[in-house]
Image (cartoon, coloured by chain):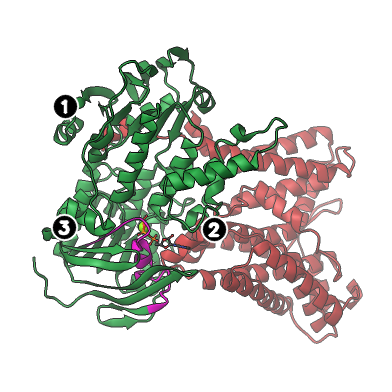
Chain colours: A red, B green
Amino acid sequence: MTARLARLRGPNNEGLLLAVIVLVVIAMSLASPAFFTAGTFFALVRSSMVPLIFALGVLLVLISGGVDVSFPAIAIFAAYTTVTLFMDGSGGTALVIFAVAMLIGAGLGMLNGVVIARFRLPTLIVTLGTQGIFKGVLIAYIGSAYISAGDLPSAITEASDRHLVDVAGGGYLHFLIVPVVVIVLLVAAMLKWTVFGRSIYAIGGDTEAARRVGIRVVRTQVWLYMLVGALAAFGGVVYVILGKNANPQSLVGTELDIIAAVVLGGASIFGGRGSVGGTVLGVVLVQLINNNLVLVGIPSTWQRAAVGVLLLLGVSIQAFAATRGRSRPVAVQKEVAA
Amino acid sequence: MTVTATPVLEVRDIVKTYGGVHALDGVSLSLAPGEVHCLAGENGSGKSTLIKIISGVERADSGAITIDGTTHGHLTPNEAIRSGVQVIYQDFSLFPNLSAAENIAMLSELAERRVLSSRSRIRAAAQRVVDDLGLSLDLDAEVERLSVADRQLIAICRALVNDAKVLIMDEPTTALTYSEVQRLFVIVRRLQQRGVAIVFVSHKLDEVLAISQRLTVLRNGRVVESGDASGYTRRAVSKAMTGRDVSETRLVNDVAPDAPQLLEVEHLSRAGGFDDVSFALRAGEILGITGLLGSGRSEIAEAVFGINPADSGRILVQGKPRRIASIHDAVDAGIGYVPEDRLTQGLFLDIPIAENMVAASLDAYRTRFGLLDRRRIRRSIADLFGRLRIQAPNSSAVVRSLSGGNAQRVVLAKWLDRKPAILLLNGPTVGVDVGSKEEIVTILREQAAAGMGIVVISDDIPELVSCCHRILIIHDGHVVAELAGDDIDADEIQRRMAA
Ligand SMILES: Nc1ncnc2c1ncn2[C@@H]1O[C@H](COP(=O)(O)OP(=O)(O)OP(=O)(O)O)[C@@H](O)[C@H]1O
Ligand SMILES: [Mg+2]
């Protein structure tokens, strides 16, 4: 019985999270008839897309035993720079724009990776520093102006209006959900089925032990931060497309919410643990609450508090699960088995 | 066996210093294929440091390493692995967050430079080694949730999963039972026949002499002796290591006839652990509890200390029945416990020795105003540091930089500082060199002579014989024999343990 319950709960409490989401959905549906509609659902999907991409990057870094707070700065740096490059109608399909932005993001990520891996500095401090640098350089050298829909490259404005599904009453499912889902699946596959992915878990579990079994820790970390930078840039471009504007002052400041969602999704702040499934659920839960508390009549001022309470709950469950698992096996039986 | 083949591994004039301390001072060593070469030396003599240099984990200040004819100034762990060097590290170096199977197979996945990782392939590889060793391990369990003994077995499996040319084992048997050690030795001999060169480090000298052909002794980072192992006795090895004669003879002080009963355990039982265990301990007495690992010997101590309380039975402390349902109850009753797994349960590795020593007894240093009495703390620290002869630059060095034996003395100091009436020690000298072992036993004798009641749980029979007034032998959770006085004899204990 308890074994089955444990299995339902999943290795990182994913099952529990799913149950909470279902409960919240039921509660909100009861509280407001306007809630349980396709429109609300599509809006939830839409508002989850950018946080989800960012969350994947945060997840990867957390698993490797670090904390990254520079991803919003990388995202807006890469997206804004790319937009200004293609602004004066100099062509560029959406694909090219994504590719260029992701290259820029990977470059900035590499900077993080090299400093962290080579000099073995604490990741939080390094990324706090680079966050400031990226934002400063963006505003000082690239541009500080708000770019509105009219001035955006045409490829971006066209992408903004591409819907996959439209529903009566104004709701729609944006086509960018397709690449977002593909990326989510790719990251999940990478973590599960590639030696690179497993090495990230190993480094997060014990960096010195990872070195000793022959993982090239420096190289792996540099690749990891490049990947995370590229993911952030992708999220940045999606953000610009969905918002139909490019503002160099945006995004920076949202990092803690994303980290909270990932930790809620079962990733450990001490490294070595976390899953894509849990991360998706964590992001969805936070967005569900952010989007819909108002709908059920709770003032928006309570949103932050609600997310805070959720986070505390999530971390407590993790801590509880950690102590529960450590009961000792029965010694005498072991000898009989041997 | 005389080996004339060209050495598979040769290290020359290795020097390694840590902030001015010479951990290794010009060490040379050569390994022939198919030989088991024992590296012996006191705690802190540089064995692990030499091993880490051979495996590329640490970089030597100077010196050269030749593997299979190729000379390296310094190696990376990768190069060492690819040249065929496999190491079982003293601290295991496992990933707590990954499954046992993945811990075992990860190294070979990496060595084969794979891109994709396959769960079934990993499981099959791990299963193969586990079967080969005849073990029953839960391969899907996360290593974090496994016992120390299981972790050590996993570390061994990992080193065997790849075909190595050189296999280095840094104290691979500290947590293993007698039968597991025997199985390991079978594998070692098989590898030897295949021409694998093996370096074996252990403080259990009987194991060393049973398995090795050659012996190199380090002292203070230098090779002091090297030769054919068959020319050595236990005594000669101890002497080479320490530079003095180490006494392992039995020496027990008489217990005063009117010494009070400190601890009486009556019909203690715990499901799945032990059944109907009774014994008593008087002030000034050292009681040994022994048995194979898994016999229940540790569980009895853990019940008396309230870690995993007993289901039934009675515990009397100084004549009064006490309910011991938690560690707190035990400490209140004046019981102290030095755990088995000192590195995870006993010490804070990254804080200084001094703070570790008083960590468990801060309450006793409270002044009238609830503040800490710094002066008294300093005095205690200085006293313990000297009394236990801890070898460290000073008491503000962090515990992680100590060798195994000295770390163990810090654990002991921590519990002695609480001045318990009754002290339980579980494997007090695991991983401790013969010289330090003698000193620790001497400290225990002194404590007992001063009126403390001491229980030593151990499978180190010579050590028990040398200091215990009485010895209980546990088998399958039952006390099968109690030996006292002249009946205490190493062979007899060995026979009863296995029976
Ligand atoms: N990272 C380090 N920093 C500082 N000193 C160190 C470090 N590692 C080892 N030492 C010192 O180097 C010396 C040799 O240590 P080493 O671990 O090689 O001893 P050992 O022979 O393996 O001992 P043991 O039998 O206790 O395992 C010791 O004095 C130790 O304190
Ligand atoms: Mg060592």
Quadrant in which the N terminus of chain B appears: bottom left
- Chain letter belonging to callout 2: A
Local SS, label 2: helix
Q: Residue at x 71, y 75 (%)?
A: A98
- Chain letter belonging to callout 1: B
Residue B61 percent coordinates (x, y): 42, 77
The answer for how far apart the CA atoms under marks 2 and 1 are is: 53 Å
Pair 2/3: label in front: 3
At label 2, which amino acid type do we have? Gly
Which quarter of the picture shows residue B175? top left
The answer for how far apart the CA atoms under marks 3 and 1 are is: 36 Å
Which stretch is magenta? B38-62
Q: Residue furthest left?
A: B1
Residue B50 colored in magenta in the image? yes
Q: Are marks 2 and 3 on the same chain?
A: no
Q: Residue at x 63, y 67 (%)?
A: A121
At label 3, which amino acid type do we have? Arg
Q: Kindly identify which numbered label has been placed on residue B487.
A: 1
The answer for how far apart the CA atoms under marks 2 and 3 are is: 36 Å
Pointer 1 local density, CA inside 10 Å: few below 14, some 14–19, many at least 20: few
Q: Residue at x 18, y 51 (%)?
A: B234
Is residue A318 something one can see in this rendering? Answer: no
Q: Are marks 2 and 1 on the same chain?
A: no
Side of B443 where A24 appears, left or right: right
Residue A277 percent coordinates (x, y): 60, 51
Q: Kindly identify which numbered label has been placed on residue B189.
A: 3
Residue A3 percent coordinates (x, y): 47, 33
Residue hosting label 2: A204
Which quarter of the picture shows residue A160? bottom right
Which one is in front, B58 or A312? B58
Q: Quadrant of ligand 1?
A: bottom left
In the depicted structure, whether residue B432 falls above or below residue B420: below
